[in-house]
Amino acid sequence: MREYEYEPVPGLPEDLPNGEHIVWQGSPEWLSLANRVFHLRNLGIYFALLMAVHAMYQVMNGQPFEVIAVSLSWQVALSAVGLGLVAGLAYLYAKGTVYTFTNQRLVLKSGVAVPMMVNLPWANVDSAGLRVCSDGTGDILLRPKATQKLYRMMLWPHVRPWHWRSVELLLRGIADPHQVAGKLGEAVLAHSTIEARVDKVVSTSDADTAKDRGFGRHEQHAPAH
């Protein structure tokens, strides 16, 4: 894991060595990241409920329509600014993230102000899981072996939340998740030095996704193919 600025290949800090090639490369969908990491939709609902309660309180106190309208106007404006900042942050994180599968490893580029690069060799991956969400995107979970050291604060938001025993990589908001999972399986199988396990695909609602507990409850292992 290290900082870098120069990219001879987009998403990579250096040219790939002989014998290594890119299998797949992509970035998170920003709206998926906004809803599942930054909880943009939940914040919008929260602000709307606050404004509705405040408006009802003013109506019950006999406030004239003009006063209620002015009060709601500045509340809407403040909520829009807050939601815009959250959405902008999610967009920057999504555009600043590149997931790269090669036939040897995963390379994760992430960061807004200071880009970071993480290499995870397939030989250090214990198992993988895929969760497909109701918006059509998916999250891919990669569990490293105990010998592979990863750091939660440096990897956020690409880590599995609510899981404190070990740091597990979570590739978020991936479009065409089944196809990408297949590419992952091909990359792992091509690396003949490890015995890979690919978890059964699990579909969850966005409510479960927000809590991010779906992997642990539903996992079933099957041979990679």
Image (tube, rainbow, N blue to C red):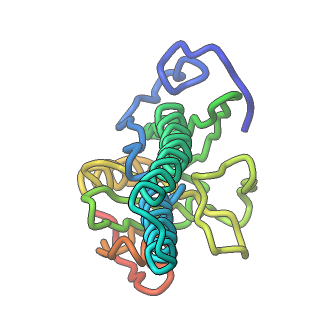
- Residue 45 percent location from the top left of the image: 43, 66
Q: Is residue 154 visible?
A: yes
Q: Residue at x 52, y 57 (%)?
A: 37
Q: Nearer the viewer, residue 217 or 135?
A: 135
Q: Residue at x 40, y 76 (%)?
A: 207
Determine the residue located farthest toward the bottom in the rendered image: 217
Image vertical order of residue 142 relative to residue 215, above or below: above
- Quarter of the image for residue 69 reads bottom left
- Front-most of residues 113 and 152: 113
Q: Position of residue 72 (x, y in %)?
A: 46, 56
Q: Is residue 152 left or right of residue 51?
A: right
| Rendered residue at 72%/56% (across/down) | 152
| Residue 189, picture quadrant | bottom left
Above or below for 199 versus 29: below
* On screen, residue 15 above or below 35: above
Measuring from the top left, give residue 97's x and y in whole percent.
51, 36
Depth check: 108 or 122 in front? 108
Which quarter shows the C terminus? bottom left
